[in-house]
Image (tube, coloured by chain):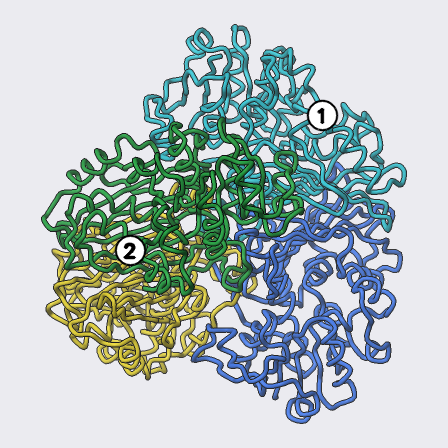
Chain colours: A yellow, B green, C blue, D cyan
Amino acid sequence: MKVSVIGTTGYGGGELIRILHNHPVFQIHSVHSSRDEAAITDEFPHLAGIFEHSLKKIDPGTIAEEADLVFLATPSRISGELAKAFAGKDIQVIDLSGDLRLSSPEEYEKWYKHKPVEKSIINQAVYGLSEWNSEKIRSAKIIANPGCYPTAALLGLGPVAEAGLIDPAAGIIIDAKSGVSGAGKTLSRVSAFAEMNDNFRIYKVNEHQHIPEIEQQLKQWDAKTSPITFSTHLLPLTRGIMATMYVQLKRELKTSELLDLYQETYSRHHFVRVRKEGDFPAIKEVSGSNFCDIGLHADPRTGRLTIVSVIDNLMKGAAGQAVQNANLMNGLDEKEGLGFIPIYP
Amino acid sequence: MKVSVIGTTGYGGGELIRILHNHPVFQIHSVHSSRDEAAITDEFPHLAGIFEHSLKKIDPGTIAEEADLVFLATPSRISGELAKAFAGKDIQVIDLSGDLRLSSPEEYEKWYKHKPVEKSIINQAVYGLSEWNSEKIRSAKIIANPGCYPTAALLGLGPVAEAGLIDPAAGIIIDAKSGVSGAGKTLSRVSAFAEMNDNFRIYKVNEHQHIPEIEQQLKQWDAKTSPITFSTHLLPLTRGIMATMYVQLKRELKTSELLDLYQETYSRHHFVRVRKEGDFPAIKEVSGSNFCDIGLHADPRTGRLTIVSVIDNLMKGAAGQAVQNANLMNGLDEKEGLGFIPIYP
Amino acid sequence: MKVSVIGTTGYGGGELIRILHNHPVFQIHSVHSSRDEAAITDEFPHLAGIFEHSLKKIDPGTIAEEADLVFLATPSRISGELAKAFAGKDIQVIDLSGDLRLSSPEEYEKWYKHKPVEKSIINQAVYGLSEWNSEKIRSAKIIANPGCYPTAALLGLGPVAEAGLIDPAAGIIIDAKSGVSGAGKTLSRVSAFAEMNDNFRIYKVNEHQHIPEIEQQLKQWDAKTSPITFSTHLLPLTRGIMATMYVQLKRELKTSELLDLYQETYSRHHFVRVRKEGDFPAIKEVSGSNFCDIGLHADPRTGRLTIVSVIDNLMKGAAGQAVQNANLMNGLDEKEGLGFIPIYP
Amino acid sequence: MKVSVIGTTGYGGGELIRILHNHPVFQIHSVHSSRDEAAITDEFPHLAGIFEHSLKKIDPGTIAEEADLVFLATPSRISGELAKAFAGKDIQVIDLSGDLRLSSPEEYEKWYKHKPVEKSIINQAVYGLSEWNSEKIRSAKIIANPGCYPTAALLGLGPVAEAGLIDPAAGIIIDAKSGVSGAGKTLSRVSAFAEMNDNFRIYKVNEHQHIPEIEQQLKQWDAKTSPITFSTHLLPLTRGIMATMYVQLKRELKTSELLDLYQETYSRHHFVRVRKEGDFPAIKEVSGSNFCDIGLHADPRTGRLTIVSVIDNLMKGAAGQAVQNANLMNGLDEKEGLGFIPIYP
C-alpha cells in the first residue's frame, strides 16, 4: 500500500517516517512539504543513508491519484484545508491536527480561535482513539487522530468514565506534563534551550484547545460529565507526557478492584499496559514506543482516585497512533510495524 | 553571632554554608558531621579556597557552650535525638527535618513510621513558616523548619485558606513536582542519572509524610479543612518545586479579586511575589534565591481555582527559610544575608 | 537460531534484548543473570507485555547445549571466566567486555589491573570491529566486541591510519565525551542525577583501559603508530559518544581529498556515514541506531586534521555492533535486525 | 560609584545586574537597551521585586555625563560603535564584546568578517585578563573584556606558556565545550530545546573568532607560539565551559612539578584554584561564581601535558571578570562584590 505524508518536516512528520520506512505493508510513496524540492536530510540529517526522498510540493489531486492513504502532519488550519481537498477523493486520510476532532464547529471556533472546517467534512471524520473506537475506525475513510494530551488522559479515564463511576459533582482534574517536542518545531523563547533547561513551567491553565476534545469523548462515555479542569506544563525533556488525574468516584472502590476493571478493559489491547498495585509508570518506560502505561490509587482517606497515564507524545500521542489507525482501517493487525521496544535507558 | 551546622555534608547543609558564609551577622563557628575530621572539601570541592573548616564530631554539650544557634540539617530521627539533646541548653535550635513539625506524636508515628520525639520537646518547637508565623518565630527558641513541599503549598494556599474561602466538600488537590536534590544525597537507582535524565516519575501517591504537615497548618487557618490529595513527582532537574493546586471556592470570585487578596496578604513580605493576571511563575525564576512566586486562575467554567507556587527546594524550601527564621529569632531584618538574585538563565 | 544473553540486567543486556526480540533470524532462547529467577521486568519495567522471560542462572554447560550463540554482557572479569567456560564448547560467543580484546596479557594486566584470561583463549577471539575485520569475523567462533570509545575512535581514524598518512612524531590526541549510560548501572556519586545534571566532567586522563585497545588496532594499520593521548569526559545525557580527534598528516591534504578517501573506504559499509564538507555530526543524529557518523576538517593554518566521530554507546558501541558481528558470523546481511532509524528529536 | 549597563536584555547584561545590584561600591545608575522604555521584568521576570528599573534608550552623551563607568554588554559591531562614542568622554568603559580585543584590525576583519574599530580606539583598550594584566588594568580607562573560551584557555595555559615551556613544533590543541547560554539569546534551531537536549555538537572547527584572541595573548607570553587548533562544542547544559588542552613541553616535567608552578603562579589570585594531583575540576564546581578551576596531568608515556580549565561562561567568562576588572580600575579589592559561592548541587 502506498502512503504519502504531508507536513514531513515537523516532528510528527519525522516520526511518521521512522515508523513507515520499516512498515511491512505501507510503503512511503511520497513526502510533501510547503518547502518542496528540499532534500529531506536538510531538515533531518539523521535520515542520511536511510531515507533520502526529496520533498514534493503539496498537490492533493496528484497525491490522491498516486497514493492509497495520506497522513496530514500539518498544523491546524492547513490540515483542515487539505482534509477538504481530499474528502471527495479516493484516498484514506489520517489527520494529526485538531481540525476534524470536534463535532461542534462552534466549540472549535471558541477554543482554536479560527474558522472551523465545514460540518459536512467533520461528520465524515472518525475520532481515532484506537482502543475505544476500533469498530468505526476499521470502516472509516477519514480519521481525526487524537491530540497527545487527550490520548493520555482518555486512555487513563476511559474505564471508570465508561462504567459511569465518576461523580460529576466533584469534577475531573487533569494535571498534564509534556516534553518540549510537543510544542513543535517553531522557534520561541519559551522553548529555547537556555530558557527551558532545568526549568519547568505551566503554560495553559483552563484554556488549552484539548479541553473540548477530552470533554467530547468523556460525554460519549458518560453524558453527565461536568467540565474538566485541565492544566498543561512543559517538562525539561524531549518526549513524553504524564497525565496525573484526580476524580471522585460515586461509590468507594478499592485500588485492587479498579485495577481489575482496567486490566479487563485493556486485556485485549496490546498497547495499553496496566500496572500492578503500588506501581506507577514513568515517562521513560514508554519512550520511543506506542505504549500507554497506566497506574492508579484509590485513597480511602479522601475517596479520591488518582490515575497516572504516560505516553510518548510523538508516538502514541501522534504518529504511532496514526499508524495504528491506518492498520485498523486496512484490515491489518493493529500492531503491524509498531513493534518498537521503549528506548532504555 | 556564632552559629553551628550539624549534618553539613548533605545538600541542605551545603546550602546553609553558601548562605551563612557571607551573612553579615551570623558567623559559622563550627560544622559537624558524623564523618568527623574529614575535610569539607572532600564532600564539596566547590568550597575550596572559600570555606575549608574541617568537620567536627557531633557533641551537643560543646556546641551549646560555644555557639548561639545551631542548624540541624540532619535526617529525620537523628534530628529528633539532637533536638532533645539541645532542648534544655542555652542555644537556639533550627531543625530542618520533619521531627518537630507535627504536634501530634500519633500522626508522626503513622506517617513517618518510627517513634516520635517526646511531646514536651515538640511543644517547644515553633513551626517556621516565616510569612505566616513571624510573631511566634521571633520569640521562639526552637524552630521546626517546614518541609519543602509544604512551604510551596502553604504559601500558595494561605490567603484563600485563612480567609475561609475554600469549600471543604470539594477538597484540596496538590500536584507537586520537585527537582532531584529534594531526594537528598543517598544513592538510589531512581535518582541515578541514566534513570532520571529525560524522565519524569510520580513517587508518592497519597502517602507522603508532608501530608499531615500541610493539613495541620491548613486546619489552623480553617478548622473545617478536609483531608488533602497530595501527589509528588520527580522532575529531571536539580533544584526547584512547583505545586499546582486545585481548590473549589465557597463562592465565585474573579481571578483579579483573588490576586488582590494575595497581593494584599503578601504586600509586606519581600520573599513572596504574586504574579499579574495571566502570568504564572516558572521554576527557574526563583532558582538559587529565597523567593516563592505565586500565580493563579479562577475558572468561570468550573468554579475551580488553580494556584501555582514555585520555590527553590534548597532555599525557601530548606536552608533559605531556616536563615530567614534565624534572622527573625534574633531581631534582624528577615532579608539579612538572603539577598540572592535568582540565577538566570 | 537460538541465542542466549548473559548479564541481561545491565544496560548492554537490555539493549541486546531490544534488538534481538525483533530480529528475524535470532530468537532469544534464554536470558541469564547472577540474579536468577527474578522477573526481567523487575529490572526493566519497560519490557512489560513485550518480553517477560524470567532470568535463569548462569550454567555454561546447559547454555552451550541449548543455544547456538551466547552474548556475554557481563562485566570485565566475569566475562573472561565465562569465555573460558564456553571456549571448548559448540557455541558461538560474543563478549561485550574488554577481557578478550588485548592480544597481550601483560598489557591487559597493566591497564585493567587484574589477572588476564589465558593467551590460548584470547588467541581464539577475533576483534569485532565489523567494518574493518569482517573477513575474520565471518569465520570466527569467539568475538571480542570492541569497547564503545574505541569503536568511535577507530572508525574515525581508520582510513587515514590504514593509508599510512598519520605523522607518528606528532601523535594522536583523542578527546572523547560519553553519555552516562556508558558508566553502567552501578550506583555512584559521580553518576547520581543531582551531581551529573548540568555538569560535565573529565574522569580518566591518560589512564583509560581503552588506550591499549585503540593502540593495538592502530598499530595493525600502521606499525609506526606512537602512543596516543586519550581523555574521557562524562556528558549530562544518557546515550552517545563523540570522539574529537587531532592528528598531523605526513603531507598536506585538503578536506575534500580526505573526505573522498573516507567515502571510498566506507562506501560499502551501510553503518558508517561520512558527512559532506563543512558538516559535522551531532550525537543525537545516531541515537538509538547502529550508525557511526564522521566529519572532518584539515586546517591549512596548522596542517592538523580534526576528525569527529559519533555513535550511540549502547548500539554501535556495544549491543548493535555485537549483533552486527553475530550477523556476519552466521552468513547474514550485516544489517539484519538493525534497521533502527535514529530517534529524533 | 555610578555605573550604567548597555545591552541589558542579553544574558551577559542580566548577569551584570545580578552582580552589580548587590555590589557594595558600584551602584546601578541606569540600564539601557535598544528596546527602550520596556520594563526590565518583561525580559527578566526573575527580577520582579528586586530590580525594576525601566530600560532607557542608548544615549552615550547622557550616559557619560551621569555615570562613572559603563559596561557594554552589546553584540559585536554595536559595541565597537559605542566604544568609539565613549572613547573621548570622561567615563570608564568595559566592553564585553570582541570588538576591542585584537590589536590588529586586519586579524579582526579576517575572523569577525566585518569592518574593525579604528586602531586609535583599539590602542586605548587594555585586554582584561585580570590575573595576568592587572597592572595595566588598574590604570586603564577602556577594557576589552576577554571572551569566555579565551579566558578558560589562557588561564589554563598561562603558567607553562609564560615560562616558555611549550614546544612550538607540536602546537597547542584546545578542545573546548560550552553551555548553551554562551550562544546568546537569539533564537536558532541549533539552540532550541528539542534539538539541544540530550545532544552534543561541535560547531566551529578551526574558525572560531576566539582563535586570534588566544594566539595574541599566547604570543605575548611566548613569541614563538605556533597557530593553535581550536574546536568548540555545545553542551546540553546552561552555564559552564571546560577547555581540555593538549601541549607538548620542551622538556619532561612531572605532574607535581607543574602543579607547583601553577600553584605558585596563582597563589595570590583568589579566583583561580589549582587542584591537587589526580584531581580535575568539573563544570558545576564553579557554577554561578567567578572562579576558574584548573587541573593537569603530564603523561610520561607520550610527554604530553593535558590541562583542564573550567569557568562559568557568564561569570568569569563575561560579567564576573568585567566586574573584577572594574574593581581593579577603581582601586578596590578585586573580590569586591564577587563573593558568590558556586551553586551546588
Q: Is residue A187 visible?
A: no
Question: Chain under label 1?
Answer: D
Where is residue C218? Give x, y as percent: 81, 60
**A86, B304: nearer the viewer:** B304
User: What residue is disc 1 on?
Assistant: D268
What whole-number distance in Å separates the C-alpha atoms at marks 2 and 1?
52 Å
> Residue at 80% of width from left, 48% of height from top?
C249
Where is residue C19? Give x, y as percent: 56, 75
Mark 2: few/some/many CA within 10 Å (<14, 14-19, 20+) = many
**B10, C213: nearer the viewer:** B10
User: What residue is disc 2 on?
Assistant: B174
Where is residue B301? Give x, y as percent: 13, 53
Q: Is residue B242 above or below residue D307?
A: below
Is residue C168 rendered to the left or right of residue A98? right
- Amino acid beneath label 1: Arg
Is residue B175 rendered to the left or right of residue B75? left
